[in-house]
Amino acid sequence: MTMEEKTKELKLRDVVQLYRNEEKTPSNSYEWYRKSAQQYGRVSIGDTDIPAYKKKGIWYVDDKEFAKAIKRHREAIKHLKQVTADYAKGIIHGKNGDIIHTEWGGYEIHGNLRFVWSNYERYRKKSYGTWYCNKCNILAGTEHNKEECHLCRDWNGCGRDCTLSRVYCSKCGAFLNV
């Protein structure tokens, strides 16, 4: 084994600080990572779980595993930015059933139609999303012929569009019966 192949131990505290310096990382505290290491024997860096181990009272991770996780995180951020830029140009990604995340929210493909949401609007309960035609890239029409669900009738709403029965494009004729 050469010196280059030998792995180094990185203190978890240092790893957390390095990860925080990356773009679009969660604001989890060191304690959150330490508890994850203690409970599961791993920590989540981006969408990657890497093993963590305790030695003489200090938590560590392998430098090569951390480097791989950071690389994957950077690739995911690059992809997110690209999908967001493509959407602004009218380029729609994915196939039927795919959920595509963007920097501002995302969209879900339903055949020739897509359901688009804004995290900002959802959080403020102003809008749960809007339907668009994938072919024409215009706002789709909706019909609401279903009965309200139990939660909407008796309580404060279900948070879904439970009365939605049909989505359609008036230009090309694409439709979806819900």
Image: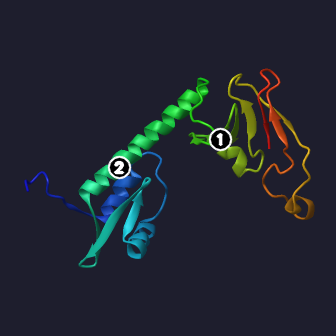
Quarter of the image that includes the C terminus: top right
User: In what element is the residue under mark 2?
Assistant: helix
For the residues labelled 1 and 2, the Cα–Cα distance comes to: 27 Å
Vertical position of residue 5 compared to residue 97: above or below? below
> Where is residue 121, by image quadrant?
top right
Q: Label 2 near label 1: C-beta < 8 Å?
A: no
Residue on which disc 1 sits: 108
Frontmost residue, 45 versus 151: 151
Quarter of the image that includes the N terminus: bottom left
> Where is residue 177, by image quadrant?
top right
Q: Image check: 83 left or right of 35?
A: right
Q: Residue furthest bottom?
A: 56
Residue 67 is situated, as x and y percent measured from the top left of the image, at 29, 51
Q: Residue furthest left?
A: 2
Vertical position of residue 91 compared to residue 158: above or below? above
Residue 75 is situated, as x and y percent measured from the top left of the image, at 40, 41
- Compare marks 1 and 2 and give the one earlier in the sequence: 2
Q: Amino acid at mark 2?
A: Ile
Number of the label disc, if any, that sits on residue 141: none
Q: Image check: 163 left or right of 32?
A: right
Residue at screen point 31% across, 50% down: 68
Residue at screen point 69% across, 41% down: 117
Residue at screen point 59% across, 23% down: 89
Frontmost residue, 47 versus 14: 47
Q: Image check: 36 left or right of 94?
A: left
Number of the label disc, if any, that sits on residue 70: 2
Q: Residues within 10 Å of mark 2 (few under 14, many from 20)?
A: some
Q: Amino acid at mark 1?
A: Glu
